[in-house]
């Protein structure tokens, strides 16, 4: 429609439809800054971001990482007998008046501290989800942009691989890798990442295909810019929206895949744990000790939901067309 | 078109072959198939290890093992499939045959329901963009999307099923329940339909009246123990559906569509009145069951053929639209008829099975009863797994349909349609919907792969001995043969689904065919 | 009947479309935009009123109010009256009864205005059935008649086809037929010919003119093209930033403009036949005989799966001397842009050669090719797409220096400042991003980038087509100055003969990938020999109603001498 910002004074003499370049301020906003500004105004996404950061902090500071101790004094492998005033090892967490008590999330059937267990599970699940997300994003972006820009063999290879993943569900492949590498969490995460890139690659390819026909890319090619520079400087920055949005969605997908294969018994193995494995272990305790079932589920749901909301906020920030105030 | 289908089939076969090699290699390298024996204290250990090594061909290189398996599969061409044996020596062909049915039933039902529900909700959210309904639905889609399916399935099992089973023996609603349910239904419908305040008020009152009235009636006659639709209700419902279909497709001005749909409705009603006694006949002997199934399918096929004939003969200028509308009506009336048959047998079923919503297995074991009781038994076993499986798909269909619909509603030709003075309802149903569905056709193929993965989990939670079980036990035992059986069925189904999606795509978009 | 008596005649009748003190504001992300500020205008039966203005003038918004189709973020004051009904006071149903029935619209973009999945005939019958004009078979027959009436051959078959099977001009005829389907009292044509080739435009304008003559339909014509106004309008209203600054008969406004904006606008329109010097100083005559570009037997093919390749450029030969501007003219599909893109190395050349200053572009490789490329500059059509949105202006202009590794950061910065001065942009633009600039400013940045390496040859692919006419004038003026200063040879690709006329030394006319005619500007544009060139010239409208009426008569005579029919509504088809 009309983007008519010329001050009334422009009427007087010139009768020009061209806006006078505003010279009063030297402040310029790059696309990135505009996106960030829109994202920061997206209430749902910002709330989700805060919650996710809190969850991550909670998971990693409470029981510590590796040799670094956390502020929570209990360990996820130890048994604690007689420390819980509640029967059956029920949670001691109280909202009003607020107190966390001895075992805020309760204890399991053999006296393990469930808070420590859930924190450990969240650590492992988050680690796997982010590793898968990052590996898949790097791979998907590289393959997708090569396929989109150079077409040819890479492109048909990509399309056939995608066809392959239509008939082999990701969960099945992940389960096979989990069965193979489940004892080694980083390796398993890497392997799942290595097979999760096709969706992003397809989207990046489509984006690159349309970007390479844009005139600024033609202009860059016409002055003799090398292909790698064109991809790095002209194409990828403009495909950033697609990449970032789908990377977040990839992370939320990965957390669901990881918990699902752990639930099937093909993922993380005891004594280590993950949120999916916790649910599998205690699924029959739902009637007797419901907290054993609820806590890990709520954590999975919270993490996945937050990541999805962040992705949605990013999508709106990169593509403001869909949102009208 | 035929050439295109053949080409796609060829490509798919190649991909299937490639996929099978990949899965085979990955599975045989996923662990040690002799692990359990190595750790056992059995005096006969060495012997058993040797035995299993021989049976599974562990001493041979992978390609020999693959070739052995493949040569068996290749015999399918001459109708003698041999999918090999698992490490216990059971024939996988037989295992697959018994498992495939229940799994495919589950996945297909979940796919179809997810598409219908998801697309409908997606359209409504797009049309009512930025309304309370839109926000609520979008939020729900996010929750569904982020929901771990196994967790949700366990919750369903423990709450929905057990609560319902506890309630069904007396099947009474409290007055509070009736009023609350009426208000909730009315609020949802008002949010979805929108309109002026006056219209909203009327919608609210009417919905509240109908819902709470119906619930009170159900309560009074304990309908949930003795539900009945009966012929009069069936006839009324079919006529109502016909009216709805006409309104949604052409409106009442077009006599051709009106006549074709009317004829279809008449044929459906008469056909069902004639056939109902035969279909209802109590059959106890399992040998007659397949005959009854064929009779059902025959009636269904007859309804569809009648619809096509009516559309073609009476459609005249609007032949295409008339045929489409008639077929849709035939589908609806068939579903109604099926529902009537099922419900009419419900009271008998709960007389035998007192807790009708099962949480385990795909059918009641050793259940010997009438044909319809078996039918209901299968259906009740499907309810919870289907719900668990559907949620994620519904979420993605809502989101994709909404985005696609909003995109289409921005197009110039929608403005052209509005400028012609066409009502908003027709702009949506006639101009926007079909264009919005085009990109969705490609989503279906990807979504189906996700559903097969989801089915493995759902079957585990609900204790089905389906394809998922075959996959899991195979993988756990590092035994590729059952996993390959799973892959053949799942992959084959995915390829078929993909092909259907492609064909639908070509039908929806004339630019492809031309 | 002359236009004047007819306009008087129309004056006595009651208006079919009236805007009274119309005022429209939009709420946007950046605050309120006042799009239309108290506009009053009316259209009578059998009269064409042109609403003229540049982008952002509010002309399309004004028209859209008549159909009540503005988006929800608009707030409307004042009154729009169609068929004695005030649009703002109607409810949904009454509004729909007005749309299509009393007022119909012809949109700018025929490629997207028709629903791709519904047959043409069904899209036509739809409006008839909604408004109860005709049903079923009768409606279909009328749809076919309408298609015949707007001059679509083989109407029975066409009605059963989908929009993608029709050409652009054909689709615009379908849109017009659709607008006519319920005999509306007034048709609003929003830039109905902007997306079309000039010969197709002339046909569509002939067709629209016959509507008002034969069916007594009132037409509100929205356009930015003064030639179209001169060709069609009885009365003209000139809009600037939401207000009508001047209105009157087309003779009054176009020949004796009173308001400074109208004068400025008319001065900015290039006149076919006037030649060099329309915008600032005339270009220098060519003195050099050295060839900057020699294209010989040039062939470019596009591969198609399953079919033999499509020859977009077929055996084309021409040349361009140092300091010379060669205009490459043709309609869509003529291959003019393909030649430009092939010369830039963006698409492969099938055969033939293209020598730039002696070295053959189709043969050289590697470093030599890169070196050669540094001597060719390029300007593209779309100012919105030709600059990378992620890079600030300074980086955009300096990019060729970086790619060819010339100078250091400081010398590059100096060069960018020089170029910003040359294209008359303030130096503060250095850190600005493309989305902060207007279309004309972006195109200046494109020109600056093209000149960064002081190229010997410039390929300008429709550099002013997407700009408003007044912006085009200032860009052309600046372009001429730069050409005189830098002395580059230029291949100027355009569909607009008047623009070519204002600056080219020589002209090459293309059709279907082949050269139809080439020669000096005077030879080709003033005394064309080939039939196609003559058609092109005859179809280009000039912004002078009297002159244009004469040209139109000449064109009709030319068409008849060539055995073609003048496009008009065939009322016989509709009376049956």
Image (tube, rainbow, N blue to C red):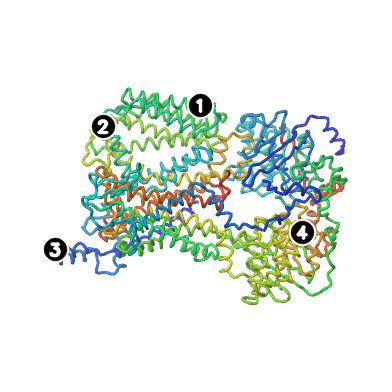
Quarter of image, res A167: bottom left
Same chain under badges 1 and 3? The reply is yes
Relative vertical location of residue B43 with respect to residue B219 in this rendering, above or below = below
Q: Is residue C162 left or right of residue C250?
A: left
The residues bearing labels 3 and 4 have C-alpha atoms spaced at a distance of 92 Å
Disc 4: CA contacts within 10 A as few (<14), some (14-19) or many (>=20):
many
The residues bearing labels 4 and 1 have C-alpha atoms spaced at a distance of 60 Å
Disc 3: CA contacts within 10 A as few (<14), some (14-19) or many (>=20):
few
Q: Which mark is residue B201?
A: 1
Residue annotated with mark 4: C475
Q: Chain of mark 1?
A: B
Of the image marks 1 and 3, the number of the one nearer the N terminus: 3
The boundaries of the magenta stretch are B198-202
Residue annotated with mark 2: B350
Of the image marks 1 and 2, the number of the one nearer the N terminus: 1
Q: What element does badge 1 sit on? A: helix
Disc 2: CA contacts within 10 A as few (<14), some (14-19) or many (>=20):
some
């Amino acid at each position: 429609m009309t983007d008519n910002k010329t001050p009334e004074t422009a009427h007087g003499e010139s009768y020009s439809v061209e806006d006078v370049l505003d010279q009063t301020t030297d402040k310029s906003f790059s696309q990135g800054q505009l996106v960030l500004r829109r994202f920061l105004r997206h209430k749902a996404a910002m709330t989700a971001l805060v919650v996710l950061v809190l969850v991550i902090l909670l998971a990693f500071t409470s029981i510590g990482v590796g040799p670094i101790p956390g502020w929570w004094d209990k360990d996820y492998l130890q048994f604690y007998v007689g420390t819980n005033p509640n029967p059956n090892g029920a949670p001691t967490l109280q909202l009003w008046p607020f107190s966390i008590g001895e075992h805020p999330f309760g204890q399991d059937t053999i006296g393990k501290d469930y808070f420590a267990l859930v924190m450990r599970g969240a650590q492992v699940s988050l680690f796997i989800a982010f590793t898968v997300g990052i590996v898949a994003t790097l791979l998907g972006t590289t393959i997708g942009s090569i396929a989109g820009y150079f077409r040819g063999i890479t492109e048909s290879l990509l399309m056939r691989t995608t066809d392959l993943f239509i008939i082999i569900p990701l969960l099945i492949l992940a389960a096979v890798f989990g069965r193979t590498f489940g004892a080694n969490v980083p390796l398993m995460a890497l392997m799942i990442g290595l097979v999760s890139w096709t969706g992003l690659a397809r989207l990046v390819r489509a984006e690159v295909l349309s970007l390479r026909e844009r005139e600024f890319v033609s202009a860059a090619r016409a002055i003799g810019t090398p292909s790698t520079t064109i991809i790095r400087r002209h194409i990828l920055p403009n495909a950033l929206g697609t990449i970032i949005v789908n990377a977040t969605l990839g992370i939320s997908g990965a957390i669901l895949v990881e918990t699902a294969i752990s639930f099937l018994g093909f993922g993380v193995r005891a004594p280590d744990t993950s949120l999916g494995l916790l649910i599998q272990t205690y699924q029959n305790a739902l009637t007797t000790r419901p907290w054993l079932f609820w806590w890990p589920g709520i954590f999975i749901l919270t993490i996945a939901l937050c990541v999805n909301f962040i992705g949605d906020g990013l999508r709106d920030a990169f593509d403001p067309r869909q949102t009208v105030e | 078109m035929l050439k295109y289908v053949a080409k796609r089939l060829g490509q798919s076969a190649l991909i299937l072959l490639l996929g099978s090699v990949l899965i085979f290699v990955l599975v045989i390298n996923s662990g040690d198939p002799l692990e359990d024996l190595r750790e056992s204290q059995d005096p006969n250990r060495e012997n058993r290890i040797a035995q299993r090594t021989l049976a599974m061909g562990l001493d041979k290189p992978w390609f020999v093992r693959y070739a052995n398996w493949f040569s068996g599969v290749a015999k399918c061409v001459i109708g003698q499939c041999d999918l090999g044996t698992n490490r216990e020596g059971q024939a996988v062909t037989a295992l697959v045959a018994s498992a495939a049915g229940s799994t495919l039933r589950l996945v297909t039902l979940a796919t179809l329901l997810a598409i219908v529900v998801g697309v409908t909700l997606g359209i409504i959210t797009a049309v009512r963009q930025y309304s309370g309904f839109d926000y609520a639905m979008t939020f729900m889609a996010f929750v569904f999307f982020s929901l771990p399916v196994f967790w949700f399935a366990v919750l369903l099992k423990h709450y929905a099923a057990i609560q319902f089973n506890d309630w069904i023996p007396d099947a009474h609603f409290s007055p509070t329940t009736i009023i609350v349910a009426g208000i909730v239904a009315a609020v949802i419908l008002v949010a979805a339909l929108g309109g002026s305040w006056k219209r909203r008020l009327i919608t609210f009152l009417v919905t509240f009246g109908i819902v709470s009235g119906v619930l009170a009636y159900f309560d009074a006659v304990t309908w949930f123990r003795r539900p009945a639709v009966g012929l009069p209700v069936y006839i009324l419902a079919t006529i109502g559906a016909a009216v709805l279909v006409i309104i949604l497709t052409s409106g009442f001005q077009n006599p051709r569509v009106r006549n074709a749909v009317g004829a279809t409705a008449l044929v459906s009603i008469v056909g069902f009145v004639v056939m109902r006694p035969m279909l209802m006949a109590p059959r106890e002997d399992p040998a007659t069951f397949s005959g009854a199934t064929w009779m059902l399918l025959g009636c269904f096929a007859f309804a569809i053929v009648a619809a096509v004939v009516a559309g073609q003969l009476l459609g005249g200028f609007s032949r295409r639209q008339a045929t489409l509308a008639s077929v849709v009506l035939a589908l609806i009336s068939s579903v109604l008829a099926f529902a009537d048959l099922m419900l009419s047998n419900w009271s008998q079923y709960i007389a035998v099975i007192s807790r009708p919503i099962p949480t385990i297995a795909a059918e009641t074991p050793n259940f010997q009863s009438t044909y319809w009781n078996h039918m209901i038994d299968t259906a009740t076993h499907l309810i919870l797994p289907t719900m668990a499986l559907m949620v994620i798909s519904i979420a993605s269909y809502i989101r994709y349909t909404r985005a696609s619909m909003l995109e289409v509603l921005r197009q110039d030709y929608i403005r052209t349609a509005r400028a012609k003075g066409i009502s908003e309802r027709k702009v949506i149903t006639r101009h926007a919907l079909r264009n919005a569905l085009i990109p969705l056709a490609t989503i279906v193929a990807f979504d189906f792969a996700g559903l097969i993965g989801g089915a493995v989990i759902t079957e585990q939670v609900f204790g089905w001995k389906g394809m998922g079980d075959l996959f899991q036990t195979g993988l756990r035992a590092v035994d590729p043969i059952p996993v390959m059986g799973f892959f053949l069925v799942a992959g084959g189904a995915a390829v078929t689904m993909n092909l259907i999606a492609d064909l639908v795509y070509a039908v929806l978009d004339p630019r492809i065919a031309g | 009947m002359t236009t004047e008596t007819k306009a008087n005649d129309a004056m006595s009748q009651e208006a079919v479309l009236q805007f009274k003190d119309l005022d429209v504001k939009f709420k946007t992300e950046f605050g309120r935009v006042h799009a239309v500020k108290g506009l009053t205008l009316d259209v009578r039966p059998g009269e064409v009123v042109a609403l003229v203005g540049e982008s952002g003038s509010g002309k399309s918004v004004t028209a859209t109010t008549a159909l009540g189709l503005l988006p929800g973020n608009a707030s409307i004051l004042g009154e729009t009256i169609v068929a004695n009904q005030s649009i703002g006071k109607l409810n949904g149903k009454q509004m729909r009864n007005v749309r299509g029935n009393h007022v119909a619209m012809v949109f700018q973009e025929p490629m997207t205005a028709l629903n791709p999945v519904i047959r043409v005939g069904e899209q036509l019958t739809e409006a008839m059935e909604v408004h109860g004009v005709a049903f079923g078979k009768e409606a279909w027959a009328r749809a076919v008649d309408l298609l015949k009436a707007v001059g679509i051959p083989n109407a029975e078959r066409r009605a059963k086809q989908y929009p993608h099977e029709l050409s652009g001009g054909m689709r615009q005829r379908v849109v017009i037929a659709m607008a006519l389907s319920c005999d509306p009292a007034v048709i609003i044509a929003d830039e109905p010919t902007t997306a079309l080739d000039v010969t197709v435009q002339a046909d569509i304008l002939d067709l629209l003119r016959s509507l008002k003559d034969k069916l007594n339909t009132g037409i509100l014509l929205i356009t930015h093209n003064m030639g179209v106004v001169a060709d069609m309008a009885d009365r003209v209203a000139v809009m600037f930033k939401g207000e009508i600054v001047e209105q009157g008969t087309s003779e009054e406004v176009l020949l004796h403009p009173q308001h400074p904006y109208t004068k400025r606008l008319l001065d900015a329109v290039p006149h076919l036949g006037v030649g060099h010097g329309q915008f600032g100083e005339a270009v220098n005559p060519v003195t050099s005989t050295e060839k900057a570009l020699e294209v010989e037997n040039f062939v470019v093919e596009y591969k198609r799966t399953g079919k033999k390749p499509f020859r977009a450029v077929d055996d084309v030969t021409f040349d361009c001397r140092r300091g010379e501007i060669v205009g490459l003219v043709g309609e869509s599909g003529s291959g003019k842009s393909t030649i430009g893109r092939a010369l830039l190395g963006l698409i492969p050349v099938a055969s033939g050669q293209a020598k730039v200053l002696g070295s053959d572009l189709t043969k050289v490789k590697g470093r030599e090719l890169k070196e050669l490329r540094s001597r060719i500059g390029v300007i593209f059509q779309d100012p919105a797409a030709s600059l990378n949105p992620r890079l600030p202006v300074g980086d955009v202009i300096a990019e060729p220096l970086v790619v060819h590794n010339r100078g250091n950061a400081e010398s590059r910065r100096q060069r960018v400042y020089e170029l910003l001065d040359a294209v008359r942009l303030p130096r503060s633009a250095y850190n600005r991003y493309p989305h902060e600039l207007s279309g004309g400013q972006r195109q200046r940045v494109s020109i600056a980038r093209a000149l960064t390496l002081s190229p010997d040859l410039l390929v300008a692919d429709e550099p002013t087509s997407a700009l408003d006419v007044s912006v085009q004038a200032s860009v052309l003026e600046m372009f001429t100055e730069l050409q005189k200063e830098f002395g580059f040879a230029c291949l100027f690709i355009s569909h607009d003969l008047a623009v070519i006329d204002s600056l080219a030394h020589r002209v090459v006319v293309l059709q279907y990938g082949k050269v139809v005619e080439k020669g000096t500007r005077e030879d080709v544009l003033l005394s064309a020999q080939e039939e196609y060139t003559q058609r092109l010239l005859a179809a280009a409208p000039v912004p002078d109603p009297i002159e244009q009426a004469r040209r139109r008569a000449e064109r009709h005579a030319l068409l008849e001498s060539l055995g073609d029919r003048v496009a008009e509504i065939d009322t016989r088809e509709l009376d049956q």
